[in-house]
Amino acid sequence: LPVHTQLPDFRLLECRGQSLGLADLRGKVWIADFIFTRCPGPCPRMSSRMASLQSNLSSEEGLRLVSISVDPEFDTQEVLAKYATRYRAVEGRWFFITGDKTAIHSLAKSGFLVGGVDDVTLHTTRFVLVDRQGRVRGYYSSSDEDELRMLQNDARALLRETEA
């Protein structure tokens, strides 16, 4: 898999009260998405697909899921915790994080290279695959079944590749 970019160091707030950053995810393969809980359309579908990924990849111990809110003013820890419960996020495996809007915007645009989130309704609907070193290794449409299968296969390949 190609290396698209190295993520910059970041630290945001997880819905269960812990801070979470790149250093905490080092050594794990992870899948990220950008969502907001008031979203009427793509976000609930993305979160349902992320829940399916959580289920389909449940045997992969080194895998994490990270949903980053692009609406931090509304998506408080409490709101994100309820949202996480709604999608049956497994604590310690699927994280919902929020923080300063400027930091999230910068992380999306300059870190993940998925465009800014100035207008929350225009955020990306792609899933992003990140390797154990914090490098972006792939982008996948959250609405394309073939790409979701490819994402699962690529995540498993990265998990095997770095364990060898």
Image (cartoon, rainbow, N blue to C red):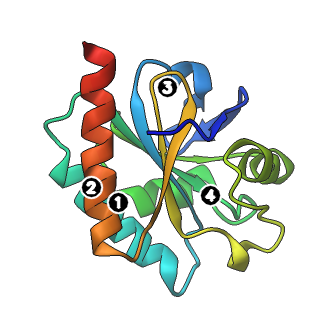
Q: Looking at the image, tell me whether mark 4 or mark 2 is earlier in sequence order.
A: 2
> Which quadrant is the N terminus positioned in?
top left
Q: Looking at the image, tell me whether mark 3 or mark 4 is earlier in sequence order.
A: 3
Measured Cα–Cα span from mark 4 to mark 2? 19 Å
- For residue 155, what is the image quadrant? top left
Measured Cα–Cα span from mark 3 to mark 4? 17 Å
Q: How crowded is mark 2: few (under 14 residues within 10 Å), some or many (20 or more)?
A: some
Query: Disc 3 marks which residue?
Result: 25
Q: Label 2 near label 3: C-beta < 8 Å?
A: no
Q: Which of marks 3 and 4 is in front?
A: 3
Measured Cα–Cα span from mark 1 to mark 3? 18 Å
What is the residue that sits farthest to the top in this orientation?
164
What is the residue that sits farthest to the bottom in this orientation?
40
Q: Which residue is drawn at 66% across and 47% down?
A: 112
Q: Does residue 36 appear in this view?
A: yes
Which amino acid is tagged 3?
A: Leu
Q: Position of residue 19 (x, y in %)?
A: 60, 29
Q: Residue at x 40, y 56 (%)?
A: 84
Q: Is residue 39 above or below residue 142?
A: below
Query: Disc 1 marks which residue?
Result: 50
Q: Which of 40 and 49 is in front in this view?
A: 49
Q: Looking at the image, tell me whether mark 4 or mark 1 is earlier in sequence order.
A: 1
Q: In this view, does 79 lie to the left or right of 114?
A: left
Query: Disc 4 marks which residue?
Result: 69
